[in-house]
């Protein structure tokens, strides 16, 4: 699941691939924003991204993609 995190007053966004589903990511983001705590996510390779909850501009959670098999587009 692709997650894009925008930070206030920063031109670049953070993009990571999370092994969590959309509901789990949304719950973690909502908790960080409501409590003003840090947003802590781990990507598929085990790297952690930590962002203070009070500087989040937006979080975009991508749609879940089904892995395609084959070489041609049908």
Image (cartoon, rainbow, N blue to C red):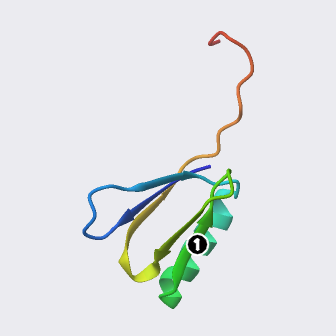
Asked where in the image residue 67 lies, by quadrant, the reply is top right
Residue 4 % position (x, y): 46, 55
Q: Looking at the figure, which quarter contains the C terminus?
A: top right
- Number of callouts: 1
Residue 69 % position (x, y): 75, 21
Residue situated furthest right in the rendering: 69
**Is residue 33 or residue 10 the one in the foreground?**
10
12 with respect to 29 (left or right): left
Q: Residue at x 51, y 86 (%)?
A: 37
Residue 22 % position (x, y): 63, 58
Q: Residue at x 45, y 80 (%)?
A: 53
Q: Residue at x 62, y 13 (%)?
A: 73
**Is residue 59 or residue 11 the one in the foreground?**
11
Up-down: is 26 above or below 2?
Answer: below
Residue situated furthest bottom in the rendering: 35
Asked where in the image residue 65 lies, by quadrant, the reply is top right
Up-down: is 52 above or below 44?
Answer: below
Q: Which residue is mark 1?
A: 40
Residue 5 % position (x, y): 44, 61
Q: Secondary structure at mark 1?
A: strand
Q: Residues within 10 Å of mark 1 (few under 14, many from 20)?
A: some
């Amino acid at each position: 699941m692709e997650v894009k995190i925008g930070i206030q007053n920063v031109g670049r966004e953070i993009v990571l691939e999370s092994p969590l589903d959309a509901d789990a990511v949304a719950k973690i983001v909502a908790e960080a924003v409501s409590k003003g705590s840090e947003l802590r996510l781990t990507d598929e390779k085990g790297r952690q991204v930590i962002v203070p909850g009070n500087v989040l501009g937006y979080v975009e959670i991508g749609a879940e993609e089904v892995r395609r098999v084959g070489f041609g587009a049908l």
